[in-house]
Amino acid sequence: MSVLPKQNRKASARGQIDIEGVRDGVLMLPGNQYRAVLNVTPVNFELKSEDEQDAIIDTYESFLNSVGCPLQILVRTREIDMDKYLDELEANKEHETEAIYKTQLENYGEFIRGLITTNKILTRHFYVVVPYTSNGKIDFAGVQEQLNLKVDIVRKGLARLGMSSRSLTDLEILDLFYSFYSPEQAKVQPFSRQALELLHTEYIQKEVANA
């Protein structure tokens, strides 16, 4: 049984998402548009002193002026499904032989269940999307080289702000799209690495090779 939609479903989804492919960490869009996506570790601005905040603002202004291209800043908040965590907690409790630790696990499990009854457990990720537009006469290696130059400038600027960053892989970019277009399913049934690799091999790399 195929884990992927049928051809007509695939065409419809591709039209909605409007991407041409993902290759070597580069998101390819129609019209010779390309994107690199950086996962950024933020700084807690509110906990900084006034002088530190002023320094960050000045550095951020200099960073924006030095980039030379528009950037997209994306904040992605996702709800975490706690059922799997609670199941693992219950399994650990069943295998625990020390009564005191077993009681602690039980109390902790009850605390988590009470917590998620009235609160959603959220995780927040920060991304910076770096663009590049090709004139159509440059091959993919050239596109990748130019985009990497832009990414290097952005990463160095973020580092001056005290933020570490890394480029998303092909699979991580696909998973990000999956979380946007199927948020509820992504919460309870996240993409396995095997499914992502199958999707990448069958639907992305082949289409790029045939382009």
Image: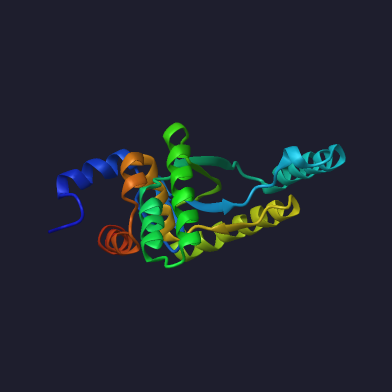
Specify the farthest residue to the top.
118
Of residues 132 and 42, the one drawn nearer to the viewer in this rendering: 42
Residue reaching furthest to the left: 1
The vertical placement of 178 against 93, above or below, is above
Residue 61 at least partly seen = no
The quarter holding residue 204 reads bottom left
Residue appearing at x 28%, y 58% in the figure:
199
Residues 172 and 206: in front is 172
Describe residue 113's horizontal placement relative to residue 6 as left or right.
Answer: right
- Pick the quarter of the image with the N terminus: bottom left
- Relative height, residue 94 to residue 181 (above, below): below
Residue 98 appears in the picture as rendered: yes
Residue drawn at the location 44% of the way across and 64% of the way down: 24
| Image x and y of residue 160, in percent | 75, 53
Quadrant the C terminus occupies: bottom left
Asked whether 103 or 40 is in front, the reply is: 103
Q: Residue furthest right?
A: 51
On the image, the x and y values in percent for residue 93 come to 40, 59
Question: In the image, residue 187 lies at what x, y percent?
Answer: 36, 45
Horizontal and vertical percent position of residue 136:
43, 53
- Left or right, 114 with reference to 53: left
